[in-house]
Image (cartoon, rainbow, N blue to C red):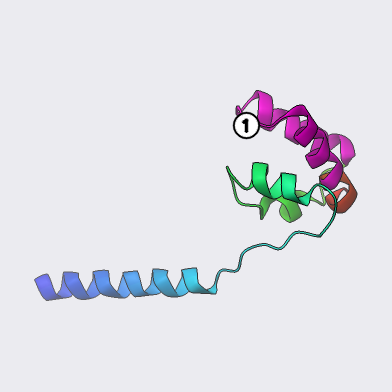
Amino acid sequence: MIRVVAFTMTAALAGLTAAAAEERPIELKPGAGLEAVEGNCGACHSLDYIPMNSPFLSAAGWSAEVTKMIKAFGAPISETDAKSIADYLARNYGS
């Protein structure tokens, strides 16, 4: 019984390791504001959300998302960075 449990756990761990090795980090479009996005947004969550939400968000939508992250979730983003982030997202990922 112990061998079965140990084998099952080893097989599961090997599967997780293989899946993690295949995952590639997101590469966002180059442009002004990218560093602010990577430094501020990437500090709290995956940057995969940006291209995933791009079909749905206009410039106003991205601005609202940045504001939500600051006011609702407490993201410590300066006003200067917030504007830079919203502008970058609208310019590169706005619908």
Residue 36 is situated, as x and y percent measured from the top left of the image, at 73, 44
* Residue 26 quadrant: bottom right
Residue drawn at the location 78% of the way across and 41% of the way down: 85
Is residue 25 a member of the stretch shown in magenta?
Answer: no
* Residue 78 quadrant: top right
> Does the image show residue 1?
no
- Which segment is the magenta one? 59-88
Residue drawn at the location 85% of the way across and 50% of the way down: 32
Residue drawn at the location 73% of the way across and 49% of the way down: 35
Residue 20 placement, left or right of 41: left
Residue 40 is situated, as x and y percent measured from the top left of the image, at 66, 41
40 relative to 23, above or below: above
Magenta part, dominant SS: helix
Residue 70 is situated, as x and y percent measured from the top left of the image, at 67, 28
Residue drawn at the location 59% of the way across and 46% of the way down: 45
SS of the residue under disc 1? loop
Q: Quadrant where the N terminus lies?
A: bottom left
13 relative to 59, above or below: below
Q: Which residue does the numbered mark 1 point to in the structure image?
A: 75
